[in-house]
Image (tube, helix red, strand yellow):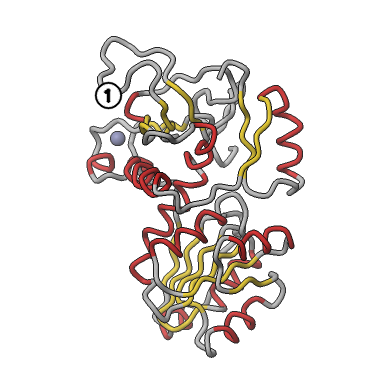
Amino acid sequence: MEPAGVTLPLVLGHENAGRVAAVGDLVSTVSVGDPVLVYPPYSCGLCVSCRRGRDMHCERHQFTGLTVDGGFADYVVVSERSLVRLPPDVDPVDVAPHADAGITAYHAVKRVAHLAVPGTTAVVIGVGGVGHVALQLLRELGSGAVIGVDSNAERRTLAGELGADAVLDSGGMGEAVRDLSEGNGADIVLDFVGSDQTHADGMGMLARGGTYSMVGFGGTLSVPSAAMVGGEQTAMANLVGSWIDLWELMQLHARGTLTLKTETHPLEDVNEVLARLRQGEITGRAVLVPDSS
Ligand SMILES: [Zn+2]
């Protein structure tokens, strides 16, 4: 099975923002014309996970653009539960990537932000579409040092511009992180790549009591339990985020302290843009804008 649950034919596009074009009779929280961001998981609001605020674990889970038609189109149909009304003066085109990239970064950082106290070191592996938001959120929600790691020079430059205390190439990153942290290693590692190599590097650079948190996936995490127990280390993983994570991220965005690195293209250029994304030629996120918006 395809890992994201995609069954063709399907309209892709899971990071969506725009203005409400029409509403059903029972819709009560938004009106035609409202600027909104679409929270991509569909959640029922009735099951135990939903009532715990973990929408992404909903028993009736659907995902816009993966299991139901998404936003590479002029219009997309969603439940009103999925909508986050944008604060005034926030343009939907500017924040569309927050719908999945931003929320995923926010969810992951919020879960470890209490560990990012003064004197600690956090490492972001992969300063791409999601990682570049996470790097800023560690700065906003935490108080420790933040190190950005990427194999791409342009992304390393971006990490520096976004406030990383240090920026490293991916080769030999474990040793370099120890050098930068007085030999202690990283208290927090957020891995936005998720390969066998980054799993090994991420666990290998952890300080005693450190937390390795996965967002990117694809490799196999293999680590001796004796080392984890001896160092009292934690490994955790993150899936998108909750509706309230996205709402909170929008409040933070409205304060103007976050930079979302984007470029815009007409929707009809979708295949060309996706090809560039696949080649690693897009720094940050590309936003597709339909003619109708
Ligand atoms: Zn539910």
Q: Is residue 109 above or below residue 250?
A: below
Q: Which amino acid is tagged 1?
A: Thr
Q: Image point 41% across, 29% down: which residue? A: 36
Above or below: residue 20 compared with residue 131: above
* Quadrant of image for the C terminus: top right
Badge 1 element: loop
Quadrant of residue 84 within the rendered picture: top left
Give coordinates of residue 170: x percent, y percent.
Answer: 69, 70
91 horizontally vs 269: left or right: left
Give the percent coordinates (x, y) of residue 143. Answer: 40, 71
Name the residue tied to disc 1. Answer: 29
**How many numbered dots are placed on residues in this image?**
1
Relative placement, left or right, of 243 versus 73 is left
Location of residue 31 by image quarter: top left
Query: Quadrant location of ligand 1?
Result: top left
Q: Residue furthest bottom?
A: 182
- The residue nearer to you, when weighing 128 against 226, is 128
Residue depicted at 36% across the width and 23% down the height: 79
Residue at image location 77% in from the left, 46% down from the top: 279
**Above or below: residue 186 compared with residue 254:** below
Give the residue at x 47% y 64%.
213
- Image quadrant where residue 50 sits: top left
